[in-house]
Image: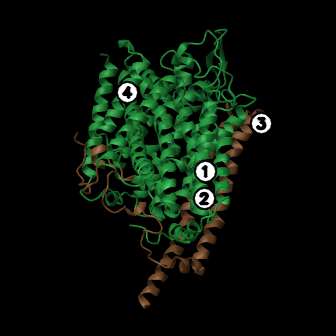
Amino acid sequence: MAQIGARREPEPGDLTPAVGAATDISPLGRTQPKPAHEQTADEDTDVAAWDQVAAMAEFRALIAAKIRFILPATIFFIIYYFALPVLVGYAPDLMKTRILGPVNLAYLFALSEFFMAWILAYIYLRRASRFDEMAKTIIGKLNLKRGGK
Amino acid sequence: MSVPLIMFIVFIAITLGITYWAARQTQGSTAFFAANRQITGWQNGVAVAGDYMSAASFLGIAGIIAFSGYDGFMYSVGWLVAYLTVLLIVAEPLRNAGKYTMADVLAYRLSARPVRSMAALSTLTVSTFYMIAQMVGAGGLVALLLKDSGISYEYAVIGVGVLMIVYVVFGGMLATTWVQIIKAILLMSGTIFLSLLVLGHWGFDLGKFFDAITTVPVVDAKTKITTATNFLQPGLLYKPPYGPLDLISLGLALVFGTAGLPHILVRFYTVPDAKTARTSVVWAMALIGAFYIMTTFLGFGAATIVTPAVIAVNGGSNMSAPLLAKALGGDVFFAFISAIAFATILAVVAGLTISASTSFAHDFWTNVIHGGKERSKDEEVRVARYAALGVGAVAILLALALRTANVAFLVGLAFAVAASANLPVILFSLFWKRFNTTGAVAGIATGLAASLILILLSPSLMGIDTAATAANARHLIQATAIFPLNNPGIVSIPLGFLGAFLGTILSKEPSAEAKFTELSVRANTGLGAEV
């Protein structure tokens, strides 16, 4: 049966489009080499000496910087989030306290979770551009080394 | 034919027409991978939101809030906060390492055959649970639309299910990025409009609206006495003694399940780099958050304007949002909202079935049963079709048995399975050097078994009904529930981690450890990732 919207040309031997909609999860019946995402560490091209990169001071600084931000941020949001079901479940009378007219603490707390998530995401977005810079520096240095050979 | 039904068919045709057109426009002749690398951050963000806002969010949460008030809103909160896990921990390493599915991540440094087959089984299970929920939603919608024609829920579910399977098995809709984008935009605009109608009903006075929420008329099942109930109060659904624990269990499943959902993970492969992956998560969070805040209007609106008693006799909790649309916007808007919900279900089911059946055929059948080689030409294709049929059939049967269950609750179970079986092994393989194949297999197996068994023993499937209980509301197993919680997350997620941990430390695999450095450098810098 004709496939809706199939204008792309499949690889020869790839029967995926015949069986259903486009998906590149393990294309069916493929005779071509594996796509890059399916390759294992042994199969893909080693573009750098991994151990050397891992030993670079810049790389270790990048990992440390990421952990310094992501770990506390994760712990914070998990505590803030689970405070809600814990308080709602085990301190219902406190959470039923009316704050704004009929609106109670439980609802306001739930609403604050949305803003917590948005603000944390925004902070991370800003912070992460620094991680991007650090990664770029590392990749830049590698090219420099390779060019010198 | 009733007016809403004709309108519904027209809207469905238009929606499918647009998606068909968009899919043709965006499918270049270049290979699938490269074509999708042009997706920008906001586009991918909208697509992620589209994938995520399934029938569960739209029909399910609105229904749970309409019947249980505040407690239903907890789904909305959990499903947004879940994206922090995706944003902070999973999305970027996955994109940097150039991995598409969970199986790809695991196979990268572990032994490919066992981990791929386990990942395929887990993907299949999570997808089936997700499908059940979508089928229940779709069946309810169609039954409501065809109410005058006397077609029962059973026939509606079977009809919808068969239609969906045929759709996927022979051809099918492309669950591509653009399909999801269009769907997300339609769903958002429908929700915004419906929210405005709700506010308009209360004269755009939030005070009046919230006052009404505190006095929702609830009819007692036994005494038939109507009492005004405060729907802003927690505890209407999650009652002691086990309610509070169940709520935490649900929270765990939601917050840790999202990062293990197969169809969400693949979204981060379609963008050019980790930075875009990150931006797209933030875009998705903005949209999803806005949508979930509006579930306040949908759910509480249905509770105050339509009232639970009326919803209960007109299709049940899953139909709260469509019934609200009918009450406020008339037949045309009702048809429009139903069509959006139905298109949403179709897109989600198509995507899920395809990914589950192909990964089963390729990763499990060919790799495990046949040692990596196809026996005959087209065998994988045949197996994939049978797998799609199998998933569809199981989903239909369970959807028939669970017809009165709330859709959001059912999807919550899919999240619990994903959080128990998938998240532990994804995290360990990205961040724990010592992690190995035995650990991955043990982790997925324990997580899957624990969550499935506990769901089977839970009060949602086990219970003794009185003779007065309607046949369609009866429990599947007529015995006292062995496990007291409806959501297994609080037990099964730790068990998944424990299985992965024990499997790892009880075995040694130096080759997996040796390759950790490569994965770590790739995941943190994006070095060597395709652009």
Read off the chain for label 1: B
Closer to the chain start, of discs 1 and 4, is 4
Quadrant for residue B357, please give it: top left
Q: Is residue A38 above or below residue A55?
A: above
Assess whether mark 2 and mark 1 are in contact (beta carbons under 8 angstroms): yes
Which is in the foreground here, disc 3 or disc 2? 2
Residue B484, position in %: x, y? 70, 30
Q: Is residue B22 left or right of residue B465?
A: left
Assess whether mark 2 and mark 4 are in contact (beta carbons under 8 angstroms): no
Residue B242, position in %: x, y? 73, 31
Q: Amino acid at mark 4?
A: Val
Question: Are tags 4 and 2 found on a single chain?
Answer: yes
Closer to the chain start, of discs 1 and 2, is 2
Distance from disc 1 to disc 4, alpha carbons, whole Å, reads 35 Å
Residue B443, disc:
1
Residue drawn at 48 percent across, 23 percent down: B400
